[in-house]
Image (spheres, rainbow, N blue to C red):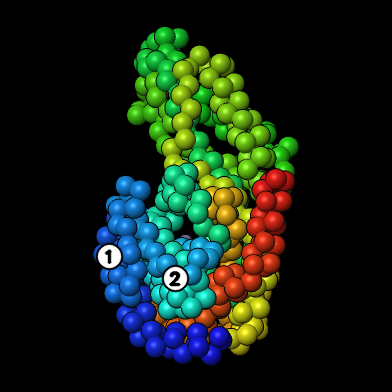
Amino acid sequence: MKNKVEILVKGLKEELIELSEFIYHNPELGYKEFKSCKAHVDILKKHGFHVEENFLGIDTAFRAEYKGEKEGPTIAYLSEYDALPEIGHGCGHNLLGTVSTGSGIILSKLVDKVGGKVVVLGTPAEETSGAKVIMTDKGAFNDVDVALIAHPADQYYKSGSSKALEPIQFTFRGKSAHASATPEQGINALDAVILTFNAINALREHIKPSAKIHGIIKRGGEAANIVPDLAIAQFYVRAATKNYLNELSEKVKKCAKGASLATGTKLKIEKYELGYDNLITNNNLQGTFIKNLNKVGIKNINEPLFSSGSTDVGNVSQVCPAIHPSFGICEEGKTFPAHTIEFAEATLTDIAYYNMAKTISALVLTGVDIITDKELLNKIKEEHKLAIAVS
Ligand SMILES: [Zn+2]
Ligand SMILES: [Zn+2]
């Protein structure tokens, strides 16, 4: 099977490089990835997939499906194709999406024989308000047995964890007045924001070390001689688990409620972006992927990157077994930060394309293993059930 897969990948490589480079040269921000989404849809249709565009009412999302002749598990590959402002594909989603779509196409050429169903999901806006959150909530992963995605990085890394995230906005409304002539008639909304920050800073001493709270003042008044009647602060609260995130978010909200009481301002609490769940890596699935990477000649796989960030794949991993490993696009041993122009350029190199092919082969072989080994899939599902129970 390994040789067969590698021959298929070799045959598709030029087409995939073309896809990744087209997306690189046409960087589009989240929910505006019209050209990139169409490029994925076109190649999937060309290879016989049935594609649902505007999936779940999201303009730049899609669901592509290829069903084998025999029944079997559903393997989903998650494509991303959004870029960053100013630096284009500095997170390498041109290559990420290509790896997922490429894996789907190759596995589709095998499922008539081995059985099962391949789904490629186009998931917009990972960098901002990730569509996987909406897609998960709307049940897009309910019929998926395992979800696979691999992110470009400097080197190969195992799938690890990411933080659960809640974005919270506090809007305080007070009353404006002349700050010097009639200050006693004013209610200062900026003071409420400042007290909120101070209360959160006191709280910070008593939170779990893995949790994070960081924020900005979005509005703080118009002029020094007017008592600010409107002030807005935005925070990200992050924690290792959903449960602790809920507990901590409540405490952060109490800081703002206290500030509102102290200042006499009215407080409105909102979620200003989508929240993310923490990523749960399925170790049985990860083990299978690593075994297959080794099989295609990739031996040097680092422990997971320490993650203080959050991803919408976290939400997916809460409803079906998933992994989110990274594959190297730089020379071995070299470290290279993402979200830079240099990283975007590194997605166009021979090393990147070599590892793209290796990663696709391993992702496809992982799909085949799951389809053909019932016991393995049972183990993966059992582990997922247990992990959710304690999360
Ligand atoms: Zn990124
Ligand atoms: Zn990314």
Instruction: Please tell me whether residue 308 is drawn above or below residue 152 in the rendered image.
Output: above
Residue 200 location (% of width, % of height): 62, 33
Residue 92 location (% of width, % of height): 43, 69
Instruction: Locate residue 160: give its quadrant.
Output: bottom right
* Label 2, label 1: how far apart the Cα atoms are: 24 Å
Question: For the N terminus, which image quadrant?
Answer: bottom right
Q: For the point 41% across and 60% down, which residue is it?
A: 121
Mark whose residue sits in front, 2 or 1: 2
Residue 73 location (% of width, % of height): 54, 64
Q: Amino acid at mark 2?
A: Gly
Q: Which residue is mark 2?
A: 68
**In the rendered view, does 355 fall on the left or right side of 374?**
left
Residue 192 location (% of width, % of height): 51, 24
Q: Earlier in the sequence, mark 2 or mark 1?
A: 1
SS assignment at label 2: loop
Res 79 seen here = no
Q: Amino acid at mark 1?
A: Lys
Instruction: Locate residue 9: give its quadrant.
Output: bottom left
**In the rendered view, does 226 fall on the left or right side of 42?**
right
Label 1 Cα crowd, 10 Å radius (few <14 / some 14-19 / many 20+): some
Q: Which residue is mark 1?
A: 38
Instruction: Please tell me whether residue 97 is drawn above or below residue 240 in the rendered image.
Output: below
